[in-house]
Image (tube, rainbow, N blue to C red):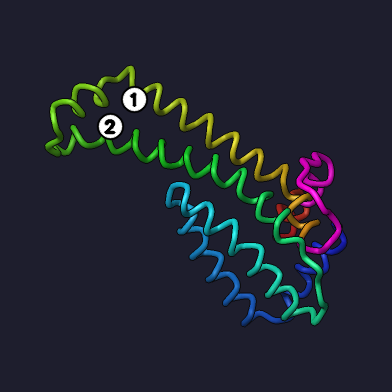
Amino acid sequence: MVQIVKTAYDLYKKDIISGILFSLVMVVLGVIIIIPIIGAIIYSYIYPRVLVWYYQKVSGEKLNPNYKVSFISMLVPSLILSVGIFLLFLSLIFEIAPLLSVNTSNVLNNYLNSSQYLNYLLIASIILTSIGIILYFLSFYSFYGSLFGKVDRYKLDFWNSIEIFSYYFTVG
């Protein structure tokens, strides 16, 4: 599996125009995932299909992806990450709004501008975001394995996922 990922990076370097187009689509998907819950679902559905399309285009190799497993592999961490980021933005908005003299209703003002509730919201967002990021990295093997037809069910494989991540980190 790791060898396949290494081959994918070599192919990326060969066809740079398609690589740039692929990167632009990835940026758009990165913006879409910020939309709470719906963005995570759209991202989890489109992202594997774009990866398979790109890999088949540059390699000429026909893949047998399992989109159901790849969807679940991206959906679980994406939903948690999306909710965590949404709560983080929400806590920042209610922290900054009083400083900018933005008028809010008294109920909202009394409830959310209390530092105790904002601290709880901030802590919850940090915890959810951290869990989402960790699950995202631990799902690497399941996600990429399902795209290449090597994995037929969702599982968190620590060592193979870390190996794939370390290759992305050093080469990518």
Query: How many residues crowd mark 2 within 10 Å: few (<14), some (14–19), many (20+)?
Result: some
In what element is the residue under mark 2? Answer: helix
The residue sitting at 52% across, 51% down in the picture is: 40
User: Compared to 167, does 16 lie above or below?
Assistant: below
The residue sitting at 59% across, 60% down in the picture is: 45
| Residue, far front | 68
* Separation of residues labelled 2 and 1 (CA atoms): 7 Å
Q: Does residue 82 appear left or right of residue 67 in this picture?
A: left
Camera-nearest residue between 106 and 119: 106
Q: Does residue 137 appear left or right of residue 113 in this picture?
A: right
Q: Position of residue 99 (x, y in %)?
A: 19, 34
Identify the residue under disc 2.
95
Label 2 is placed on what type of residue? Glu
Residue 9: in magenta span = no
Q: Which part of the image, by quadrant, shows the N terminus? A: bottom right
- Counting the numbered discs, the total is 2
The disc placed on residue 22 is none
Q: Which part of the image, by quadrant, shows the C terminus? A: bottom right
Label 1 is placed on what type of residue? Leu
Q: Position of residue 75 (x, y in %)?
A: 61, 49
The residue sitting at 37% across, 40% down in the picture is: 89
Stretch in magenta: 147-164
Q: Are marks 2 and 1 in contact (CB under 8 Å)?
A: yes
Q: Does residue 50 appear left or right of residue 94 in this picture?
A: right
In what element is the residue under mark 1? Answer: helix
On the image, which quarter does residue 133 sit in? top right
Q: Tell which circle, 2 or 1, labels the residue nearer the N-terminal end.
A: 2
Q: Position of residue 92 (x, y in %)?
A: 33, 36
User: Compared to 8, does 106 lie above or below?
Assistant: above
The residue sitting at 59% across, 39% down in the picture is: 132
Identify the residue under disc 1.
118
